[in-house]
Amino acid sequence: MIGALITTGLSFVLALSFIIIIFLKHKPKANKVKQSFILLLVIFILFFVNIYVIMPSIIVPNMLVLNLITAAITLPLIYLLLTGGKATIKARYSRFFIIVGLLILAVPATYLYGIFSLDNVHDSIKTEEKDQAEPLSKDDTPIAVAPESARNKMQKAMSVVPNPQFYDLGKLQVQKIKEDIVYVAPLEFTGFWKFVRGQETEGYFTISATNVNAQPEFISNKMQYTNSSYFHKNVQRVIYDKYPHYVQSGEAQIEVDEDGKTWYVQTLYKTLTITDKPNLNDLKVAVVDPNSGEVSLYDTEEAPAFIEGSVSSEIASLQNEYYGKYVHGWFNSKFGKKDVRIPNESGTEKSVTPVFGENGEMYYFTDMTSPKENIDSALGYTMIHARTGELTYFNGEMNNGIMDSEGAKQIVNKEFPEKNWEGSMPILYNIDGNATWVVNVLDPNGLFKKYAYINAADSDFVVFGETANQTLKNYRIALQQNPGFVNSSDGAEIVKVEGEIDRVLVSTSDNIQIVQFILKNDPIIYTVNTTIEPKAIFLNKGDTVNMEVKIRDGATGSVESIEIKGLTD
């Protein structure tokens, strides 16, 4: 209400002043004046309704455009009505039309100023750059389920919801509830009449984000204020009515506190000076109680602790765009393109993918590529903290020459053309010191089929598997068989192992012989490269060995040194 009045306030005052001056100069008939006031009232009621519906934020560009439209319609109509249809504009009235003309000129001037202020938006991002890239640890970042797969399962479970014909799934959101990382999706009304009949939604679904075999659970939790409700119960309107001078970023998402209570969370920002460009150094979050409609506003990092994503994925995508594209302003982004990096569109949420770091906090991951066409190598990647909005750009030796996320997806897409299976949610991990893309393989219905582990430096090095653990194990074995395998940079500790050989397998890769074996009463598969110990090729069942080994996940062991009793000692 207040926002609508403020937004068209200038044009209302302008039109009212115009009527008064014409009345004082011409003394038009009373019925003409009355008709003018009625016309003015009708026009502003219509504009008020329009503003109520579209809810434009109270920022300079919006106010200029709306006041221009209102004044351009209102002033000529009132002038023609009061002067009896004579369209001659006398000099004493021209000032009003000059004001309209200035409004017309102010609109493109504002947007032009905004274009040349893009480097200011870039500078407003809280940024840290690291020369040494540190791909994510597979153990620290356990999200393994693609959101398409999670949503598909939730859709199939809609029959457990009372009156399921009233609802559809809302925005899917990753968060940690207690110690479990889950996807959460609220029920939303499918239309106006469903809202009229239902008045409140029934609850929300959760499903594990770490277990591809998990099934969704429906939680009964009635909500009156939702994204799909209408009038004063619409979440966007509730926030707009209280904070019309902020811009809302994307759609409000649901977050669940430790007691299972739901809250709608919406990221807000103010714009820079007179532009419509965001000030990314001053982000806020509005938290709405879906039962009472009460709204609280916080700095994003000061939001209640249960809120993982007080910075929305939409804001994270904006940050990536402004950070990578406008590093030296708009002109450089079009010509020259010095230091320009383009975020890939492979993310699961508005081109970003939520992940959890080793500290248990959520980040948005995006890899960056070159603006040059037909280049599919990654220049680096960004991690944006989902509460503070701080962007960290990783760029270093590990990213030199590795493929980007689009390239990883294309490798999967080409593998199963007859089945139309496609890659989803590529995330760059550090597996035993090797940059590795881990990709979900989904069927056309979004159902999970396989994992793909792709060596980011070698597009031909791909391992597929049914489960995360087995695929990781097979990938590590394949790495150990590769002469170019890098194992010195990972964090696995070296342990001493002694035992009797039970089984041996010798293979050759790029003219390098690899020996794999297991010990009696030991499930670990050990791998030794003959460049480490040439005599390892002569290993036989029954030999006794003493070794220094890097063991990973209790499944595979990379032999750093080996002594074979009777052969090397």
Image (spheres, rainbow, N blue to C red):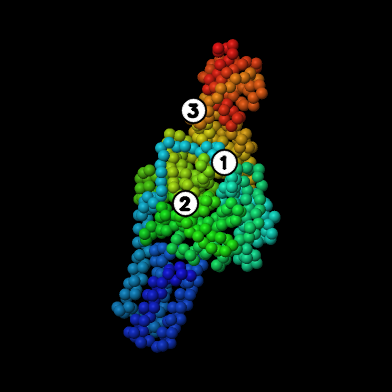
Residue at 34% x, 71% y: name it. Answer: 99
Residue at label 3? 488
**Dot 2 crowding, Cα within 10 Å, few <14, some 14–19, many 20+:** many
Residue type at mark 2: give it: Glu
Q: Which residue is mark 1?
A: 142
Task: Tell me the crowding category of disc 1: few under 14, some 14 to 19, or many 20 or more residues within 10 angstroms, Cα based.
Answer: some
Give the residue drawn at x 40%, y 88%: 29
The residue at 66%/47% (across/down) is 215
**Label 1 sits on what residue type?**
Pro
Q: Does the CB distance between marks 2 and 3 fall below 8 Å?
A: no
Sooner in the amino-acid sequence: mark 2 or mark 3 = 2
* Residue 35 visible at all: yes
Q: Is residue 368 visible?
A: no
Q: Gap between marks 2 and 3, in whole Å?
A: 37 Å
Numbered-mark total: 3
* Residue 279: % across, % down: 40, 55
